[in-house]
Image (cartoon, rainbow, N blue to C red):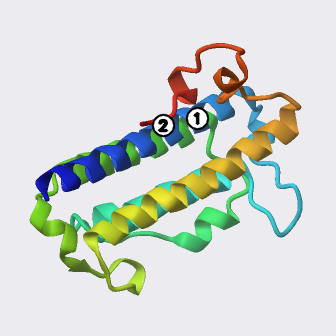
Amino acid sequence: MAILASAFKEFSTGKLRQFVERIEFCLGKLSEEQIWARPNAASNSAGNLCLHLSGNVRQWILAGVAGQPDLRRRDEEFAAQGGVGREQLLVRLRGTVEEACAVIEGLPETRLLEVVKPQNYEVTVLAAVYHVVEHFAMHTGQILLLTKAATGEDLGFYRHLSGGGTGGGAGEPLP
């Protein structure tokens, strides 16, 4: 069982780090204006999504699993219309994810089935980690789409599948 717990933690933290790399790549292609542009009133900007991902990871892993205070202001993540620059967004996101990865990596196998209550949901620690990775994946995809729409460029993450290179870096899939 220990090998499964280890594989789960390694894969989860690897994916979170990969998603952050892809978001960094995308924000590097966007102007500050594009980072905060919303396609319509019902949609979020890449900036909102970065704030939201930081808040979600902090609430579910750092507060829910690690027991830190839950200071999240979820509505403010979506209400923001700027005021946080690219570097600030990336420092916040990268820092939160690295802190969460340290928590996940340090989890003893026995904690994975412990019940925690992030955001008033009763879930196991394993389910909390799984939720965060799935949630991060979904919003990373939205940021990729916003970037492609704003730039008109193929981001090249899967170019290696078409014979156009070896992949690597932010485009390297995890085994």
- Residue 12, horizontal then vertical, whole percent: 36, 50
Instruction: Check disc 2 and report its element: helix, strand or loop.
Output: helix
Number of labels in the image equals: 2
Instruction: Check disc 1 and report its element: helix, strand or loop.
Output: helix
Find disc 2 in the rendering and name its residue. Answer: 18
Taking the spot 83% from the left edge, 69% from the top edge, the residue there is: 42
- Residue 55, horizontal then vertical, whole percent: 47, 61
In this picture, residue 4 sits left or right of residue 165:
left
Taking the spot 30% from the left edge, 71% from the top edge, the residue there is: 64
* Image quarter in which the C terminus is found: top left
- Residue toward you, 54 or 134: 134
Q: Amino acid at mark 2?
A: Gln
Label placed on residue 22 = 1
Taking the spot 82% from the left edge, 49% from the top edge, the residue there is: 37
Q: Amino acid at mark 1?
A: Arg
Instruction: Give the image quarter of residue 25.
Output: top right
Label placed on residue 35 = none
In this picture, residue 59 sits left or right of residue 163:
left
The answer to whether the residues at label 1 and label 2 have Cβ atoms under 8 Å apart is: yes
In this picture, residue 165 sits left or right of residue 174:
right
